[in-house]
Image (tube, coloured by chain):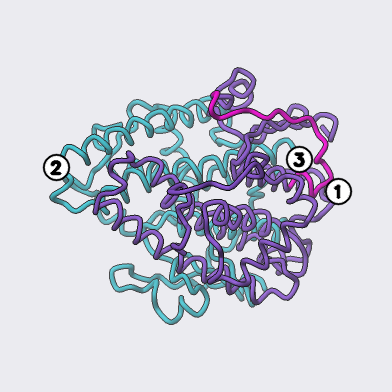
Chain colours: A cyan, B purple
Amino acid sequence: MGKEDMHLIWGSGSGPCWKAMIALAEKGFDDIEKTLIEFSKKGHKSKEVMELNSRGQVPTFKDGDIIVNESMAICLYLEKAYPNSGTKLLPEEVADYAKVIQLAIEAQENLNMKIMIKCIYFTWMTPEEKREGKEFIEAFENNIKDLKEELKIWEKHVKESESGHVGGKAFSLADVVLYTFVAYLVRFGSSLDDYPNLLKYYKNLGERPSIAKTFPPHWKEGPLEGKKLLFKGAL
Amino acid sequence: MGKEDMHLIWGSGSGPCWKAMIALAEKGFDDIEKTLIEFSKKGHKSKEVMELNSRGQVPTFKDGDIIVNESMAICLYLEKAYPNSGTKLLPEEVADYAKVIQLAIEAQENLNMKIMIKCIYFTWMTPEEKREGKEFIEAFENNIKDLKEELKIWEKHVKESESGHVGGKAFSLADVVLYTFVAYLVRFGSSLDDYPNLLKYYKNLGERPSIAKTFPPHWKEGPLEGKKLLFKGAL
């Protein structure tokens, strides 16, 4: 157990992997052994992954003999095992802890459902010819409407935070979670013009070393284009 | 802060509410002030709820001035604020903690998606006349197939556990989460015949006071019937 015994298997552009990597960087473990897999080559179903994670998913993370694969569990594990290393992802004081854990889980549950599942995956899972159909368009528009309501909640949270961190005075697990979802909005074409505080949050926290260094490498190669920009003009 | 200052607003048959109630009972806080709302009367949108939880959802939980509403956050909060009260929902030892937090979040993510969203809510959200159609039937059958694969994973976890608790030697947060989902399978008609260890787990843990006392009251009034039994003969 410890930095020398850690190994992370990850894929570029995966939100859960990115969360784990931000948390590792914040705890001072950004230079651990890492293996980058390619989803297109089914790297997440490789023998190396399957031996540690029979679901064939990334992130797959080990620390010596300890295996933790769910991104939120990795963050909580790191804080439990290494409370005094790097950033405290969860505050010590009980009321502060309550705020951070509530916001982190609230962001994970709601933004994963409303951004990833109901907009991005929903589009990807619909055959291309059906995406022009009335049924898909209506459903997608409803999902966008829900997402806009959801984003107003986070715009308000970020606006109310004087520190620029959503969970309180300092960077925390709530930022690890929220940031990756806001970045997904931008990646898929949102200008965030209607959410000026989320835009500022996205820009400012993007300069934080743990986030800048772990930004999905293939996102830097160039923006998505055309119809892939699901959120362009929509939010 | 403390037992006298706690208040839980809940609804019968809500898995998230039930998780919070099991956790509260395990920590010795089962006799706190509680308000039972009725979903059919939009009790979750009442002024009392909305003031504490602008999403209008239950559970809504307060402990003095501290408000925590996400069920997993409530469990983590209780363990943080009252580590020495009642059952330890999360083990002290790091490797044991890792196992419990991984399984708790793995159960929450996968079983919520595969039981609740892809089977139960998917059916409820489909207009009744469409439930006889080929498209719905094919999609539902695929979702059932995925769920069966998922249940094999948990059958194996429970089988391998000598203690009868999924997360290790003792009852833990992983059981709080897993139990409520297994109970949903039974409520919606599964006999669990193909999952003998999950059936044993369901029966044995069902006698645990924290679970027996918090079992959804309206589930005791009688079983679902007819087509409402989505999992009857299906799993």
Residue A99, position as x, y percentages in the image: 65, 36
| Residue type, label 1 | Ser
Residue A104: in magenta span: no
Residue at disc 2, secondary structure: helix
Q: Is residue B132 left or right of residue B150?
A: left
- Residue density around tag 1, few if under 14, some if 14–19, many if 20 or more, within 10 Å: few
In the image, which residues are magenta?
B23-41
The residue carrying pointer 2 sits among few (fewer than 14), some (14 to 19) or many (20 or more) residues within 10 Å by Cα, namely: few
Q: Quadrant of residue B206?
A: bottom right
**Separation of marks 2 and 1 at Cα, in angstroms:** 57 Å
Return the residue at label 2.
Answer: A132
Q: Are marks 2 and 1 on the same chain?
A: no
Q: Residue A14 lies in what quarter of the image?
A: bottom left
C-alpha separation, residue under disc 2 versus residue under disc 3: 52 Å
Percent across and percent down for residue B192 are: 56, 65
Pointer 1 indicates a residue of which chain? B
Residue picked out by circle 1:
B85
Whichever of labels 2 and 3 marks the residue nearer the N terminus, that label is 3
Q: Name the chain letter of the residue that bears numbered label 2.
A: A
- Label annotation for residue B116: none
Q: Secondary structure at mark 1?
A: loop
The reply to whether discs 2 and 1 touch (Cβ–Cβ < 8 Å) is: no
Distance of mark 3 from mark 1, alpha carbons? 18 Å
| Element on which disc 3 rests | loop
Question: Residue at the spot x=45%, y=44% of the render?
Answer: A207
Residue A93's tag is 3
Query: Looking at the rendering, in which quadrant would you find the C terminus of chain A?
Result: top left
Where residue A179 sits in the image (x, y, percent)? Answer: 46, 44
Amino acid at the residue labelled 3: Glu
